Amino acid sequence: MEMRREIGGRELQMRYTFNSLCAMEERAGGGLAQWNNRQYTPVRLLFWGALIDRQPEITLTEAGNLIGGHIASGGTLEQIAQLCLEALEAAGFCRDEDE
């Protein structure tokens, strides 16, 4: 499932796939189990991973620039992290085991 949001003045499509998760792990040099501990790099990587399926030209640096623009406009890193979590859940990759 994909989500559409305006971030940093640009309309973006966010969608995680198995390949995008693998690409993120490759870039991170391992798993992403600790992405939500308020570190900047994992959030940027998760955001980039959500975008690359529908906007393959987006670089990791551009994803960071979009996040920076969002924050400069009064948004928060936590909002980006929350969007990523919602996109992961929508894609079926981040469900509670009880569900």
Image (tube, rainbow, N blue to C red):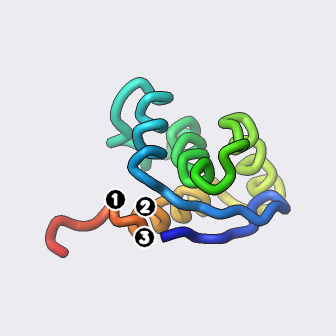
Mark number for residue 90? 3
Mark 1 is on which residue type? Phe
Q: Is 14 left, or right, of 34 in this rendering?
A: right
Image coordinates of residue 10 in percent, x first then y, are: 81, 61
Mark 2 is on which residue type? Leu
Answer with the quarter of the image where residue 90 lies. Answer: bottom left
Residue denoted by label 2 = 88
Image coordinates of residue 4 in percent, x first then y, are: 65, 71
Q: Is 11 left, or right, of 24 in this rendering?
A: right
Whether pointer 2 and pointer 3 mark residues with C-beta atoms closer than 8 Å, the reply is yes
Whether pointer 1 and pointer 2 mark residues with C-beta atoms closer than 8 Å, the reply is yes
Image coordinates of residue 44 in percent, x first then y, are: 60, 43
Mark 3 is on which residue type? Ala
Neighbor class of circle 1 (other Cα within 10 Å; few <14, some 14-19, many 20+) is some
Mark number for residue 93? 1
| Callout 3 secondary element | helix
Query: What separation in Å lies between label 2 and label 3 (alpha carbons)?
Result: 5 Å
Neighbor class of circle 3 (other Cα within 10 Å; few <14, some 14-19, many 20+) is some
Q: Nearer the viewer, residue 36 or 3?
A: 3
Q: Residue at x 66, y 58 (%)?
A: 76
| Callout 2 secondary element | helix
- Residue furthest to the left in view is 98
